[in-house]
Amino acid sequence: MPDAILRLALPSPLRRLFDYRAPAGVPRSALQPGMRLRVPFGRRELIGILIEVCERSDVPEDKLKPALELLDNQPPLPPALFRLCLWTAQYYQHSLGDTLSWALPVLLRQGEPAEARQERFWLLSDGARADDPRLARAPRQREALKVIAQHPHGVAHQLLGQLQLNKDSLDLLRAKGLVHIEVRRHAPRERHASWLAQPELPLNAEQQVAERAVRAGFGRFGAFLLAGVTGSGKTEVYLQLIRATLEAGKQALVLIPEINLGPQTLARFERRFNARIALLHSAVNDRERLDAWLAARDGEADIIIGTRSALFTPMQRPGLIIIDEEHDASYKQQEGLRYHARDLALVRARQEDVPILLGSATPSLESLHNANSGRYGLLRLEHRAGGAQPPRFLRLDIKSLPLDSGISGPMQQAIRKTLEAGQQVLVFLNRRGFAPTLLCHDCGWLSECPRCDARMTVHQRSNELRCHHCGHVERRPSQCPKCQKLDLRPVGAGTERAEERLAILFPQVPVLRVDRDSTARKEAMNSLFNTIQRGEPCILVGTQMLAKGHHFPRVTLVAILDADGGLFSADFRASERMAQLIVQVAGRAGRAEEPGRVIVQSHLADHPLLVQLTEQGYFAFAEQALGERRNAGLPPFCHLALLRAEAHKPGQAEGFLDEACGEAELLLNELQLDGIELLGPVPAPMERRAGRYRAQLLLQSSARAPLHRLLHSWLAALEQMPSGRAVRWSLDVDPIDLF
Ligand code: ADP
Ligand code: ZN
Ligand code: ZN
């Protein structure tokens, strides 16, 4: 019989599998698809995943290398997850090996055993007695033996300290055969009689309708969109559905956006349940991540909470998937495997036949479209649960009004009145730093980044110019680099400038800034929120970090300094994002007694989208915006794929894309595909970034199937193209930004 050929997926961008022979001494019967093997690859070693065992290979016999080592005696990835990875690799046209390595916890990619960590337990040996004559003159050992005897299931090694057990005494006892060590996995937590550690709130009528609709769909696939205004009690609905899931003996997976990781969100889940919660997010270290992943896979964790990549956590008994803030952009990965966790969660729910609930106060136009067309059940919560009033919106036309650090006169008055009434103000400006650019008043020099087609932002505190696109930093010049004159002026306003100006205008109240620069330190953030919670008058200035997670019940005025960026951007999603941001920021404010007011400064105060949003609310806005997308043939009414390329020399990326475009035209003909348009290649909106020249080619298709047929053949051709070697290129299926 010929040697078995192992076909492996390797963590490489190449969209193909690699053949090896079995490692020496490993019988064919020991090999199952899904197992990990260590293999030689060029001068390196890689860990690959066995996809299939077959009889023959196209690789010549003498070139076929044996794998070095089989790492598993069970496939670590359960079949359901493996299926999801296969689907993902195909849909995003990504290498299967690389897809699997994004899906697996880091330690498994590095070859760590895929088993829960073993722990050492100290146990009393049969027949051991505290009055053993050998201990007559060893009081410490006698004491230790007594303690061990009190723990019939043993004492975990790491708890010795807590029980004041001394390792030396135990070693001596062990030498006498009175105690012994057993290595086993940590005992699973005891099940409580009730899953609830805390009583539930009685649901209001709207919440009940939503909760019952999802619960009626337990046990099979079904998608629901929970569109509830901020504070309407969506989280309470999640919690009660999770309880029902646990009672049915199943596990729940909850995805949350990166930035919502506030301890508040997690604490709410932990307070509510007597359940094992596995956390998988960026602050969790590799070992904890693996443990959480294994606990979920083996059915020991009841609730799995995590950010984007937690989507790939296997579950032994999946029962429910929840995507909180489903509109959030952090669900889309922007490098390597460019997947959208929300979209994949739907695929997973269908594959595993469980219901999925998408929640948001500002649902994405994609999800609303799916709800409108009946693919998702639409569940609305229109009232705030605590009885708080919804905020009122006002548009403030600032055409021809002077701006003082971005703040108009009428806005300053509104802020003053609010503070005088003893209330708090939130000032929102989605631009950090002091000013977006530095200008020489004499010669017109602008602080351009040497590596990007972008201006460098002035940062006053650190006295630097920083590029927010590539991270380039320079000292802020005191004279013009071009004409040497001294009249350099910051143009425009960022949060740092607004903060500085507000502190001068309102010296009697604290002004607190919340953005990526100010909140690098965790304590700073905490002390800030303490100040806010105390409820005295103050001004909060910040970027979109203010839009997430936190509630500021004492804020009664939300001042939005700049809504214009979202209304005339080249990016067709900009208006949707702006609307979501405004509504999310607005939703942080107000409570029962003091309804919030939102004032939106704009040069385009009559823009129909802004009028809809401020007068009729987010849903009216969304309908209008969906109408515009339909007319323009944009998503969700078409499907996009974006081929990006970048290179060190100008023209190189376009050259590759030109060739790619020609190839696509040939394939369209050959495969007889209709309804696909090729737009480009064109330089990227920011052509040069971090020293590279970038260009892109957009594919727009009325239907998904032909687009995917094209992509499949096209990528195979692109990989063979010599001009592709000189550039860095990547395909983004369903891109969420076109930059
Ligand atoms: P969302 O997730 O929609 O922002 P939350 O679930 O956080 O809303 O609820 C907002 C506030 O209303 C919280 O303080 C919560 O405790 C309270 N709340 C939620 N549901 C109810 C209810 N049925 N009865 C009373 N208060 C509720
Ligand atoms: Zn100058
Ligand atoms: Zn730059």
Image (spheres, helix red, strand yellow):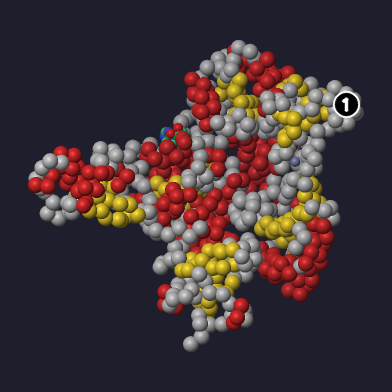
Q: Toward the viewer: 355 or 571?
A: 571
- At label 1, the amino acid type is Gln
Q: Is residue 693 left or right of residue 512?
A: right
Q: Residue at x 83, y 25 (%)?
A: 479
Q: How many marks?
A: 1
Q: Does the Cβ of the disc 1 residue fall within 8 Å of ligand 2?
A: yes
User: x, y (%) of residue 486?
Assistant: 85, 22
To which residue does mark 1 refer? Answer: 484
Q: Toward the viewer: 464 or 45?
A: 45
Quick check: 717 above or below 277?
A: below
For residue 237, what is the image quadrant?
A: top left
User: x, y (%) of residue 300?
Assistant: 36, 53
Q: Specify the farthest residue to the bottom.
A: 1
User: x, y (%) of residue 77?
Assistant: 46, 63
Q: Residue at x 69, y 49 (%)?
A: 737
Q: Which quarter holds ligand 1?
A: top left
Q: Residue at x 56, y 53 (%)?
A: 341
On the question of residue 500 being in view, the answer is yes
